[in-house]
Image (tube, rainbow, N blue to C red):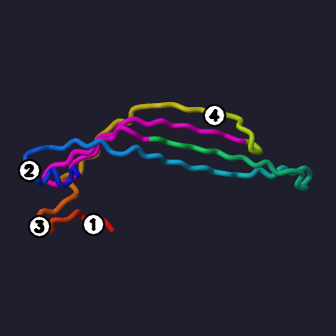
Amino acid sequence: MAGRWGVEDCAALAVVQLATHTISASYRPRVDVYVDEVLVTRVDLELAISFVVKGMLALVRDGCLLEVRSGTCDASSTLLCEHVPVVKRSTSFTVPGVLRLGAGVELWSPERGTQASFG
């Protein structure tokens, strides 16, 4: 547990690899086709998008999360028309940036001897 480790050795900086995260979403619009104001058919579409973020690092000192360093992202998308794949694309890229958390977010409190509560 990096939060506790940071408290036991106050001078040390723990670098912890975070778990891989997957973010997915889909959108299912429908196109109504009219001829002379009469509905002749409906076309169902679906756009599915997925992002897999991995390799993120957390820096912990004194039981506090100080920053999160970004990693890489695998992105994929598929467009379906009437449940048939029409276009499918994927790419990978490095996510730039560092999220600095100022004085940090407390993960472990030596006074309480417990993990911080976020609920």
Circles 3 and 2, Cβ within 8 Å, touching? The answer is: no
What residue sits 23% from the left and 63% below the top?
115
Foreground residue among 33 and 86? 86
Q: Which numbered disc, 1 or 4, marks the residue that appears first in the sequence?
A: 4
Cα gap from disc 2 to disc 1, whole angstroms: 21 Å
Q: Secondary structure at mark 4?
A: strand
Q: Report crowding for label 4: few under 14, some 14 to 19, many 20 or more residues within 10 A (C-alpha).
A: few
Amino acid beneath label 3: Glu
Which of pointers 2 and 4 indicates the residue nearer the eye? 2
- Residue at numbered disc 3: 111
- Residue at numbered disc 4: 88
What residue sits 88% from the left and 55% below the top?
39
Which of pointers 4 and 3 indicates the residue nearer the eye? 3
Q: Which numbered disc, 2 or 4, marks the residue that appears first in the sequence?
A: 2
Q: Report crowding for label 1: few under 14, some 14 to 19, many 20 or more residues within 10 A (C-alpha).
A: few
Residue 59 falls in image quadrant = top left
